[in-house]
Amino acid sequence: MEQYYHGLVRYLTARLRDRHLAADVAHDAYIRVLESPRHHALDHPKAFLYRTAINLCVDSFRRSAVRRSEPLSEVAGEESLQMQSPQATLYQLQRAELLQRALDELPARCRQAFLLRKLEGLCHDDIAQAMGISKAMVEKHIVNAMRHCRTRVAEMERIS
């Protein structure tokens, strides 16, 4: 399925007019497809991948459209409702700890590429240049890191 990545990013860039956003959506689409229990049995994996990416774009657009149309007073009231209970805070801390353990299991270069993208917000070209590797390798590192982290956190949550 990796052979579709560059075409998908180009397709999404043309529609979203933002290459970084397109790369993020493509990554999320890949993760969704790869985590699907039936991804090995797809008759048309490229079509499924593109449809997943389009659906992610539509969902994001709908959420942002709803948020933009809400009155400020409602948004401010909503923020006060988001004050977390001690249980919710503990849950978030536990998940962060699980994620840190999953990140620690990654090879150093894979973890570095992932963190440069997700924490520093660097684009793939900048990461490739900083790490002295190809852009394709950066993309593989990031996809592998995301897949590993999701799998490991889910496994660790089942055990806990």
Image (cartoon, helix red, strand yellow):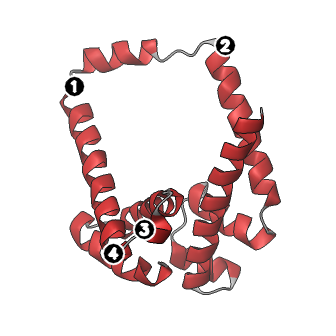
- The type of residue carrying mark 3 is Ala
Determine which of the numbered discs, if any, sits on residue 23 in the image: 3
Q: Rate crowding at label 2 as few (under 14), some (14 to 19) or many (20 or more) other CA atoms within 10 Å.
A: few
Q: Rate crowding at label 3 as few (under 14), some (14 to 19) or many (20 or more) other CA atoms within 10 Å.
A: many
Which residue in the structure is indicated by mark 4? 44
Q: CA distance from mark 1 to mark 3?
A: 29 Å
Which residue in the structure is indicated by mark 2? 86
Q: Is residue 63 above or below residue 151?
A: above
- The type of residue carrying mark 2 is Pro
Which residue in the structure is indicated by mark 1? 70
Instruction: Name the secondary structure under disc 4.
Output: loop
Q: Is 157 left, or right, of 5 in this rendering? A: right
Question: Which mark's residue is nearer the viewer, 1 or 2?
Answer: 2
Instruction: Name the secondary structure under disc 2.
Output: helix
Residue depicted at x 27% and y 16%: 74
- The type of residue carrying mark 1 is Glu
Question: Which mark's residue is nearer the viewer, 1 or 3?
Answer: 3
Residue depicted at x 68% and y 85%: 132
Residue depicted at x 32% and y 78%: 10
Question: Which mark's residue is nearer the viewer, 4 or 3?
Answer: 4
Q: CA distance from mark 2 to mark 3?
A: 36 Å
Q: Is there a contact, CB below 8 Å, between mark 1 and mark 4?
A: no
Closer to the N terminus: mark 4 or mark 2?
A: 4
**Toward which corner of the image does residue 117 lie, by quadrant?**
bottom right
Closer to the N terminus: mark 1 or mark 4?
A: 4
Question: Which mark's residue is nearer the viewer, 4 or 2?
Answer: 4
